[in-house]
Amino acid sequence: MAVKKKRKRIKRKPGQKSVLYFDKNTEVAILAFLSAENTRQRELIYGESILPAVSKLSESLIYVYGFKSPLMSTAELIEECNFSLYNSLHKWDPNKGSKAFSYFNVVAKNFLINTTNGHRKKHYKHVYLNDVENLGNDTQKQLSEYIELPSTEEMMLQRERGIEQVERIKKIRMLLSDARDLTVMSAVEKLFESAEELDFINKQSIYVYLVELSGMEKKIVTKSMSKIRKVYAQILADESKANK
């Protein structure tokens, strides 16, 4: 029977305090960052008083929970998490009662979970052709049935569909007047522009990404997207009538 190894417990020396890398001073710095009047001032505050705490938070979560990505090194994952936290700074509202550390700890953890899961899914669904000969006969047969490049006609159709979608997006923008709807529409446009570079797990991930891109509250994004979908449906209906 295998003997279980006991986990090593790290004890502090008597009187030794833990190092608080994300403390009240960090909260004050974030508030100063959000109220800064110019870009230069924000850059100074972020670089000197926020980035060290944010970077340490990202690093600690990655090592404590063992987050790993088959597509990124640990250093790259930390950088990506830092960037996500930077984009979320404006979302923290101290008036809602949450401490900055608690709020950004949740934001960072969710980002790391979604990112590493997405990377694993993307990585393991690809098989390099150089490795095919090392697979079993049954696996090689199954793989050969799925390896099929799209025809030239299909690629042309895909390109045309993409162009049509871009034109529809332009039409939708012209039919919107509310500033909030236009802001959400800008986020949708950015989503389309970078669609090939993104790896979403589900619709909820797309929605969360839209909220982050727009910088709007969830309920506003939901309301705007409902209006955008109605306009989009009307455009499709008009196109259908015109083609008859």
Image (cartoon, helix red, strand yellow):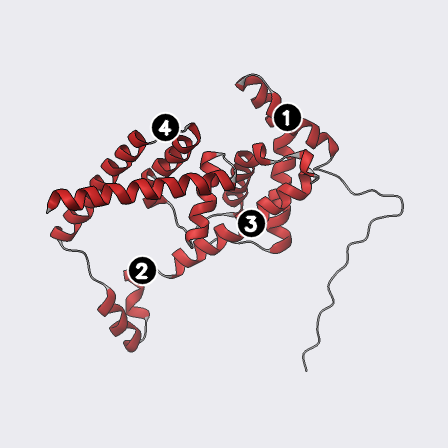
Q: Mark 3: which secondary structure?
A: helix
Residue type at mark 1: give it: Glu
Mark 4 to mark 3 CA distance (whole Å): 34 Å
Q: For the residues carrying marks 4 and 3, which lies nearer the camera in this image?
A: 4
- Residue 110 bears which disc, if any? 3
Q: Is residue 54 left or right of residue 126?
A: right
Mark 4 to mark 1 CA distance (whole Å): 41 Å
Q: Find out whether the residues at labels 4 and 2 contact each other: C-beta distance under 8 Å.
A: no
Residue type at mark 4: give it: Ser
Q: For the residues carrying marks 4 and 2, which lies nearer the camera in this image?
A: 4
| Residue 192 in sight | yes
- Mark 1 or 3, nearer chain start: 1
**Where on the picture, by quarter, is residue 92?**
top right
Can you give x and y, in whole percent of width and height, for residue 27 in the image? 69, 32
Vertical placement of residue 66 versus 184, above or below:
below
Indicate the quadrant containing the N terminus: top left, top right, bottom left or bottom right: bottom right
Q: Find out whether the residues at labels 1 and 3 contact each other: C-beta distance under 8 Å.
A: no
Mark 4 to mark 2 CA distance (whole Å): 49 Å
Q: For the residues carrying marks 1 and 3, which lies nearer the camera in this image?
A: 3
- Mark 4 or 1, nearer chain start: 1
| Residue located beneath label 1 in the image | 48
- Mark 4 or 3, nearer chain start: 3
Mark 2 to mark 1 CA distance (whole Å): 44 Å
- Mark 4 or 2, nearer chain start: 2
Residue type at mark 3: give it: Asn
Can you give x and y, in whole percent of width and height, for residue 157 in the image? 16, 48
- Residue 128 bears which disc, if any? 2
- Mark 3 or 2, nearer chain start: 3
As drawn, the residue found furthest toward the bottom would be: 1
- Residue 177 bears which disc, if any? 4
Q: Find out whether the residues at labels 2 and 1 contact each other: C-beta distance under 8 Å.
A: no
Can you give x and y, in whole percent of width and height, for residue 153 in the image? 11, 51
